[in-house]
Amino acid sequence: MTVTPAPLTSPVQFFDTRGNVTEPYSFTEALVAGLAPGGGLFIPTELPHFTVEEIVDLARLPYHKRAAAVYKAFAIDLPDEQIDELMALCYGDNFNDEDICPISSLDENTHILELWHGPTSAFKDMALQCLPRFFSASAAALRERGKLDNTFCILVATSGDTGKAALEGFKGVDGVSIGVLFPDGGVSDIQRKQMVTTTGDNVQVWAVRGNFDDCQTGVKRTFADSQFTDELMAERKVALSSANSINWGRLMPQIVYYISSYAQLVADGKLEAGQPLDVCVPTGNFGNILACWYAKHMGTPIGLLMCASNENRVLTDFINTGTYDISEREFVLTPSPSMDILVSSNLERQLFELTGRDSKAIAAWMQSLNENRSFQVDRDTFAKLREDFAAESVNNQECLDTIHEVFDAHGYLMDPHTAVAYAAAERLRSENPVLVASTAHWAKFGNNVYRALFDIAPDAPLPPEIAALTGCQLNALIADETGCFYVPENLAMLDEMPVRFTEVIDADVPSIEKATQAFLDTQTL
Ligand SMILES: *Cc1c(COP(=O)(O)O)cnc(C)c1O
């Protein structure tokens, strides 16, 4: 017998964290809009609820059907058959493991959720293989309903991982073009090659003279230039859009893997149905751990949510004190760059939920963050936060030591982001089994994995003969030295792939707009 989770009785609707949305948005509308009017984030009015039996029963299904079951439970405004078809494309042979995100158990109570088997070997694929297809389907549905008559150009500023995952996700998707800007000289050899060798007709990549901040500021100002955006709409019927992690369409696929992992651990006999599972997540923008919170509050028996930070420990301090303060915090470069963040955009959603959906409180805190670079939550909200969360930060040396120790003890090689989570989990763990979210394949960060294995300090230079290697050559060497590790083909082949994009542009708005126009001239959307 199969137990299908009961869907919400009416299709899910969305309002926002700052109280500006008066007419609720449907799923397709919220996805296409991305950010709510007034700068708040979309939140579903209601969450579907799963019983433990329903969750455990999902293990019978292949991953794409588990994902479809969760989407259907939200009763989103797309037909069930279309959800099935899209999910089969999102989570199929574009992943190099048929379980999509398999779990490796280091011991009876320590399980590693490998979220990096997708086309770019980073966990962003879990969301970015899904969002673009649902974005395109949502836009098409809205066009059919007479609510939309334009296509989209996605612009993404990236410090490394997101850009490639967005390119792979949006490439070949109908009604969308995508342009990615990365800081020239500011990303690793592997990351740059991943981007500039991207195939597909609707993609473009620019190196930008400047750092990541310059890229991001340039893109934000381009979005805000209404003369430019009006012109694109009038002359091309193209709207600019972003694919960043505040889009609900990126969060929802992440809820799926926590529900699915619970089911899998029970099916594999590693967990009793109903037994609490603690989860530790290496956290940057708070998207991944927030998805876990939603999974818990939709019925998954998750115990403690452990938030792991690197030396940029603003979230750890917040969870331990109730004060979010970046007024005197310096931004630090670490071996886990995807967690080098000062303002965690998805935290706003979490606070909204913890306050019992109090948009006035959120608006005030966000204003305080803007004006004073800090805010402090009230006692009730802090108590709620502490019911679900614990937090630890891990310094750069501890991160590399962890990679080395886990390799020696278990023969398992971790990337630096995963190592931060593993070390935090070791300090925070209770009697419950722990699931550690592993967010990147080690070969994306070969330099620091090499430092870890050969006991080179985090900020020390690599020996000249190692520094002279390409990213691919270094990974091959690490795979050789450690003996038992594969480098995914998409990373191993990069030196042989033809470079398609060599243009370098300035970070100012006119340069970005000119480049965007030239790109759109090549596109028939
Ligand atoms: C983006 C990213 C993170 C942080 O995830 P958030 O959802 O932003 O908290 C952690 N690790 C890796 C490898 C990432 O790419």
Image (cartoon, rainbow, N blue to C red):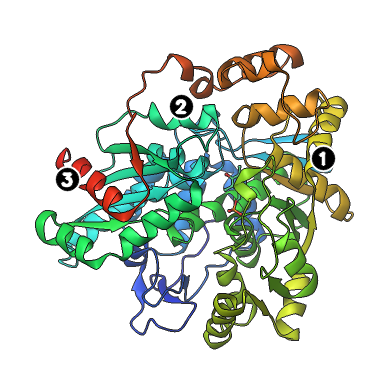
Camera sees residue 149? no
Which is nearer the eye, 464 or 39?
464
* x 78%, y 60%: residue: 391
Distance (Cα) linking label 3 and label 2 = 27 Å
Residue 241 placement (x, y as % from top left): 32, 57
Reading the image, the residue beneath label 1 is: 397
Residue 115 placement (x, y as % from top left): 60, 40
Residue 305 placement (x, y as % from top left): 73, 60
Give the mark toward the camera: 1 or 3.
1
Camera sees residue 60? yes
Reading the image, the residue beneath label 3 is: 525
Q: Tell me the kind of residue under disc 2.
A: Lys
148 versus 401 height, above or below: below
Q: Tell me the kind of residue under disc 3.
A: Leu
Distance (Cα) linking label 2 and label 1 = 28 Å
Which is nearer the eye, 290 or 67?
290
Reading the image, the residue beneath label 2 is: 193
Give the mark toward the camera: 3 or 2.
2
Ligand 1 contact, mark 1 (Cβ < 8 Å)? no
Residue 174: image quadrant is: top left
Task: Give neighbour class at mark 3: few <14, some 14-19, many 20+ (Cα, 10 Å).
Answer: some
Q: How many marks?
A: 3
| Mark 2 or mark 1: whose residue is earlier in sequence | 2
Q: Tell me the kind of residue under disc 1.
A: Gln
* x 65%, y 20%: residue: 467
